[in-house]
């Protein structure tokens, strides 16, 4: 901590100043590498991010992801030309699945991002302030937590109308309470710690304490949760897409693809198999990654 | 303990009220026009108006809200505009199917999850542990709708072992309704044939639904077991030469079971809300399907009703878990 | 230990599989064979004067009778409860003579008073079927002359009058009144009960699961299949096309209605399964907002119409569709093949575009379709692909039906393009022509907000004219003018398709029925 630094000590290099953190990170990395499932998760996530970043440039039929129609080559089985076969409009499923990673990444980032953006500050305030502020915030949070998420999201989207934006808004609305509860509990624990007490006693202002002490100490569970939530948000959005409330055509969205493709079972199995598998692998990747991170950063939280 | 229970009940009532307000507001952000849907495609404007006024949809939204809340206090959940029936009747009709499905799925989750959790705790960091971990996380990551379709394809269409969808064969007369659960009711009436076929219909959806629940049961059980296995008395028991199989099966499991049960309680409400997709895929006539079809028709009273019901069951489950903990550990009663 | 567990599990599996082993196809009960119809749409309210979507009307037609009935392809109005009728010279008065032997399921005779009450009920409730007649018929205009004669005095001559009557079912006033609550005309009770005289009566009624009708042994009109009359029909909800197909293949259903186009092609190859494939009357059009926005420009509308790949539309249905040659469907009286109906021609499309306010394109148009309608979505994709050639972008927007209709009721909020399937309720050309009347603004089929005073005037004249030649002449002119004004991209008529087991006999097709709707009355099962 900063108050342990000696004022007269000679200026230190970055490595020296952060020696303990670096050691920590090295330890984490070592532990992480030792876990097969964590590495698998990391690999899946990296592959997903790569496809999301470069998808449109590496797919064989980029125009198929924008709604090109080839009525002559409908529902072809997987082959050398079409690795994952073609869909009911003759579009290349491989291209659409890959570019779909982008849509999914976007969905995941927006939902978890919005969720954390709303939930974390509320959680910190609730935990730190206490009193009626905490009571109010936590009541509302519990209220949202008691409502079944998917059912609520469904109602919201049905009310607002289908579409990707509405879908993300709906899921963000049901997503933030999880962060409030997590951060509030953590804040409650941290604010009793000695270093927070001492900061307060030397007259540090509340925002400064929140920013420099509380937030950093809540960071690891937040990171773990966000990693897990990326996957779960993608899954939930795919579920809404499946019901028919997700991205409109021709945007390649995995849930919507499975939704259309389910009518083509079982004779044209590849149509639903590959987008579904893409959802599965992506969510699996984020969950394994989050799980691995949790083992390292937040080992005690495992029970709950 | 009594005052603690009372306080909890008050909170439940407050939360229910909150949910009602919340869902009403949400479903009315940009309400569709269900009256037009049920009036039929060719209906004239005055015909649509007839239906609107019949259901009070022509009144200001605040007034609609007040009326709804008043009715709610008397146990009236409003009327579905699509089916013209009271929402409460329909909830009572569809809820047993969902609850049955969830219970069977949970049972599956426990039967598979607890032993797997034990195994991976005993062989912590071994290959079994890694495999179960990947399996359990896979369970959470599986899109239920997709997995359900794959199961249907393989077990129903390909192998022909299990029925594709529905709850009972067509000519099978459902047993007299006692609990609403076909499995239990058919057992009560001693109709094993119906029991068997009801079982064959519920297997696939229950398996699909059980996966996420299985995963969380497994993980809680594993974590608890690890903790218990490292505790002093287990170490002492080992020192006394009690066989390690016995230790794991009896002493450790007993202590790890309570948190697992708590987890299951918490999971119950969550699963009720997540049956939506599974019910859609398997044509399971429960409240999830009811909520989806109502939401798609902008018929929001049933949606609010379903949300309230699930929220209620969820809170009840949570409260029971809290009470159980408080009963065991009096220190928690002050919280 | 493990082996015993495995044995138990296996035994359980074997036990359960033995039970569901697919089996005989139709369901055999003690009373006879029960036909199983697999459909996607629920029947929330059975009351014949409240609702009439296809699944509802299929059952209504089973349990109720009307004065007349549509049968055959092309559809004709056949005498039913009414054995004969006559019209007055001025077309204002219609008199129907009822058969004497018709009786309701509870034994009451079907009298003129029952008919009068039923029409009054339909008009006064002002729901469901009311729109068909309410502008021309007041409850006071109906009189029971004697027990078996009923007279309708219209407010104005209305040529299509008779064509609507098959959808006005007759209920038993005694039963309805006995079950009235707070003067609701028995609405609550008729939701899941019936008071009819039709060939079937209600059996099990499990909303959202299955709806059963059982046949009436001594149906007053007899049974065309005689002794082979089925014990009943179960309409079973199977929401997923894949599940429908599986149910058909496994013999859990005898006839299904909702397969995908590709499925029909595929399943036709399965032995013992027959595809019913008939030319329908449901028109598909991409309706422009002709009043507001870029599509108010007729040249742009023409450009889009010429850019459209019509063959792809038919290909979407795997060939089970035919292109519209007029705004009126082929099976409709008075239909003519309009010359110069646009077909894909990029040269022409570009010519028209050059004449429009957007010679270079460069605009984005909304295309709205009902969420969940697969074919409409795909036609949107075809449109999107085709309009790239004109440098026009298409924004495909699925909407829930009520929201789409609500937006389309007002010129200001009507999207540029909306895909509309419209099934005419009768075989009279007025049923379609009136969609292009200015009075149809605000209705889903009037979403184009088409306004040509001359066309509106001709439609009014044709409605009132009693002489068919005059009407035919008017409808020919109406059709030509509408095509010239291009308020929509005239699409195709999709075929009506069902897949059934080959032993299911007595299937009859009539284009005036809704998509999916089947006449249950003549069906039977041929056993080997």
Image (cartoon, coloured by chain):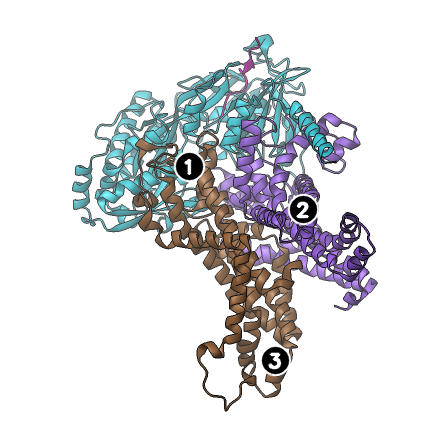
Chain colours: A brown, B purple, C cyan
The quarter of the rendered structure image containing the C terminus of chain A is bottom right
Name the chain letter of the residue that bears numbered label 1: C
According to the image, label 3 marks what residue? A196
Which quadrant of the figure has residue B5?
Answer: bottom right
Q: Which quarter of the figure has residue C349?
A: top left
Q: Looking at the picture, how far across and down is residue B174, in whole percent?
A: 70, 29
Disc 1 vs disc 3: which is toward the camera?
Answer: 3
In the picture provided, is A140 more to the left or to the right than C293?
Answer: right
Q: Which residue is mark 1?
A: C374
Give the structural element (helix, strand or loop) at label 2.
helix
- In this rendering, the answer to whether C497 lies above or below A4 is above
Q: Which residues are magenta?
A: C517-528
Q: Are marks 2 and 1 on the same chain?
A: no
Is circle 1 on the same chain as circle 3? no
Q: Which residue is mark 2?
A: B116
Total numbered labels: 3
Q: Chain of mark 3?
A: A
User: Residue at point 37% right, 50% down?
Assistant: C413
Residue C160 seen anywhere in this rendered image of the structure: yes
Quadrant in the picture for residue A174: bottom right
Have a look at marks 2 and 3 and say if they share a chain: no
Of the pair B318 and A11, the residue shown nearer to us: A11
Gap between marks 2 and 3 measured at Cα: 42 Å
Label 2 neighbourhood size at 10 Å, few (<14), some (14-19), many (20+)?
many
The residue drawn where x is 41% and y is 31% is: C423
What's the CA distance linking mark 2 and mark 1?
Answer: 43 Å
Q: Is residue B176 left or right of residue C319?
A: right
Give the quadrant of the N terminus of chain A: bottom right
Label 3 crowd (10 A; few <14 / some 14-19 / many >=20): some
Classify B198 as above or below A180.
Answer: above
Q: Are circles 2 and 3 on residues that touch, CB within 8 Å?
A: no
């Amino acid at each position: 901590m900063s108050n342990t630094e000696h004022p007269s000590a000679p200026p230190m290099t970055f490595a020296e100043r952060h020696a303990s953190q670096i050691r920590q990170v090295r330890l984490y990395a070592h532990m992480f590498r030792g876990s097969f499932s964590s590495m698998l998760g990391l690999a899946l996530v990296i592959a997903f991010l790569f496809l999301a970043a470069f998808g449109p440039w590496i797919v064989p039929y980029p125009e198929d992801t924008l709604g090109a129609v080839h009525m002559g080559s409908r529902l072809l089985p997987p082959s050398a030309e079409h690795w994952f076969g073609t869909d009911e409009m003759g579009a290349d499923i491989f291209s659409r699945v890959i570019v779909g990673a982008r849509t999914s990444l976007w969905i995941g980032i927006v939902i978890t991002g919005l969720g954390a953006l709303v939930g974390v500050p509320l959680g910190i305030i609730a935990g730190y302030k206490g009193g009626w502020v905490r009571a109010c915030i936590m009541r509302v949070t519990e209220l949202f937590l008691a409502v079944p998420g998917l059912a609520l999201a469904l109602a919201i989207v049905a009310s607002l109308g289908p579409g990707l934006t509405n879908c993300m808004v709906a899921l963000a609305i049901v997503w933030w309470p999880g962060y409030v509860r997590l951060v509030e509990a953590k804040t409650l624990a941290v604010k009793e710690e000695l270093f927070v007490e001492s900061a307060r006693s030397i007259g540090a202002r509340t925002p400064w304490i929140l920013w420099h002490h509380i937030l950093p100490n809540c960071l690891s569970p937040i990171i773990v949760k966000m990693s897990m939530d990326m996957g779960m948000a993608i899954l939930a959005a795919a579920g809404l897409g499946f019901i028919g409330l997700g991205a409109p055509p021709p945007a390649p969205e995995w849930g919507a693809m499975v939704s259309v493709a389910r009518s083509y079972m079982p004779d044209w199995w590849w149509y639903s198999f590959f987008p579904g598998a893409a959802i599965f692998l992506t969510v699996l990747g984020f969950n394994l990654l989050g799980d691995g991170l949790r083992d390292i950063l937040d080992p005690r939280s495992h029970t709950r | 303990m009594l005052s603690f229970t009372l306080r909890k009940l008050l909170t439940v009532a407050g939360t229910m009220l909150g949910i009602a307000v919340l869902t009403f507001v949400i479903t009315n952000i940009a309400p569709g026009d269900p009256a037009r849907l049920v009036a039929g495609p060719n209906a004239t404007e005055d015909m649509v108006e007839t239906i609107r006024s019949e259901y009070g949809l022509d009144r200001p939204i605040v007034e609609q809200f007040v009326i709804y809340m008043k009715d709610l206090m008397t146990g009236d959940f409003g009327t579905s505009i699509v089916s013209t029936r009271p929402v409460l009747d329909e909830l009572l009709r569809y809820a047993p199917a969902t609850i049955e499905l969830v219970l069977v799925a949970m049972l599956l989750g426990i039967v598979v999850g607890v032993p797997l959790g034990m195994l991976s705790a005993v062989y912590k960091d071994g290959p079994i542990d890694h495999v179960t971990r990947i399996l359990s996380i896979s369970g959470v990551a599986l899109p239920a709708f997709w997995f359900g379709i794959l199961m249907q394809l393989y077990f129903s269409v390909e192998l022909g072992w299990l029925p594709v969808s529905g709850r009972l064969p067509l000519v099978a007369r459902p047993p007299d309704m006692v609990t609403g659960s076909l499995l239990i009711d058919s057992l009560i009436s001693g109709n094993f044939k119906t029991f068997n076929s009801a079982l064959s219909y519920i297997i696939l959806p229950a398996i699909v639904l059980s996966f996420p629940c299985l995963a969380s049961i497994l993980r809680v059980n594993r974590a608890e077991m690890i903790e218990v296995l490292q505790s002093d008395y287990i170490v002492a028991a080992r020192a006394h030469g009690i066989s390690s199989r016995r230790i794991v099966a009896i002493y450790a499991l007993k202590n790890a079971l309570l948190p697992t049960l708590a987890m299951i309680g918490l999971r119950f409400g969550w699963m009720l809300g997540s049956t939506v997709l599974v019910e859609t895929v398997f044509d399971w006539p429960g409240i999830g399907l009811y909520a989806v079809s109502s939401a798609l028709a902008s018929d929001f009273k049933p949606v609010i009703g379903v949300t309230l019901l699930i929220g209620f069951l969820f809170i009840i489950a949570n409260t029971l878990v809290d009470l159980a903990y408080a009963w065991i550990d009096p220190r928690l009663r002050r919280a | 230990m493990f082996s015993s567990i495995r044995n138990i599990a296996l035994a359980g599996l074997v036990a359960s599989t033995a039970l569901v082993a697919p089996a005989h196809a139709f369901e055999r009960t003690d009373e006879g064979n029960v036909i199983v119809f697999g459909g996607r749409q629920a029947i929330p309210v059975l009351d014949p004067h409240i609702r009439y979507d296809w699944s509802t009307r299929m059952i209504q037609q089973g349990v109720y009778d009307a004065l007349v009935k549509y049968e055959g392809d092309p559809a004709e109005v056949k005498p039913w409860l009414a054995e004969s009728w006559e019209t007055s010279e001025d077309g204002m008065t219609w008199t129907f003579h009822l058969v004497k032997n018709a009786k309701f399921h509870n034994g009451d005779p079907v009298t003129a008073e029952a008919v009068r009450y039923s029409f009054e009920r339909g008009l006064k409730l002002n729901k469901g079927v009311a729109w068909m007649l309410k502008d021309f018929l007041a409850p006071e205009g109906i009189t029971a002359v004697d027990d078996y004669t009923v007279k309708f005095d219209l407010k104005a001559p209305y040529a299509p009058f008779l064509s609507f009557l098959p959808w006005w079912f007759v209920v038993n006033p005694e039963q309805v009144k006995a079950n009235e609550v707070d003067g609701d005309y028995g609405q609550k009770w008729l939701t899941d009960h019936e008071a009819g005289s039709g060939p079937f009566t209600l059996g099990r009624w499990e909303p959202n699961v299955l709806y059963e009708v059982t046949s009436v042994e001594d149906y007053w009109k007899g049974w065309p299949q005689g002794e082979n009359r089925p014990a009943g029909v179960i309409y079973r909800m199977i929401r997923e096309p894949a599940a429908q197909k599986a149910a058909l293949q496994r013999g859990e259903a005898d006839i299904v209605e909702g397969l995908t186009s590709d499925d029909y092609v595929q399943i036709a190859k399965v032995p013992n399964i027959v595809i019913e494939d008939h030319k329908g009357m449901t028109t598909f059009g991409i309706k422009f907002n002709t009043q507001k926005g870029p599509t108010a420009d007729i040249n742009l509308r023409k450009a889009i119409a010429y850019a459209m790949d019509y063959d792809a539309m038919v290909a979407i249905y795997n060939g089970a569709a035919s292109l519209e040659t007029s705004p009126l469907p082929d099976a409709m009286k008075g239909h003519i093949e309009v010359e110069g109906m646009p077909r894909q021609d990029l040269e022409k499309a570009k010519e028209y575009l050059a004449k429009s306010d957007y010679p270079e394109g460069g605009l984005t148009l909304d295309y709205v379709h009902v969420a969940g309608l697969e074919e409409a979505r795909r036609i949107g994709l075809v449109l999107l692909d085709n309009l790239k050639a004109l440098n026009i972008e298409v924004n495909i927007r699925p909407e829930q039906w009520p929201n789409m209709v609500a937006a389309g009721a007002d010129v200001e909020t009507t999207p540029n393009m909306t895909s509309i399937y419209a099934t005419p309720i009768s075989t009279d050309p007025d049923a379609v022509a009136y969609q292009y009347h200015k009075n149809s603004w605000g209705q889903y089929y009037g979403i184009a907000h088409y306004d040509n005073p001359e066309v509106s005037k001709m439609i009014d004249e044709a409605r009132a004219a009693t002489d068919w030649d005059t009407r035919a002449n008017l409808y020919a002119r109406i059709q030509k003018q509408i095509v010239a004004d291009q308020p929509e991209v005239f699409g195709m008529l999709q075929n009506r398709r069902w897949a059934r087991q080959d032993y299911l006999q007595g299937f009859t097709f009539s284009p005036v029925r809704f998509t999916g709707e089947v006449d249950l009355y003549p069906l039977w099962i041929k056993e080997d």
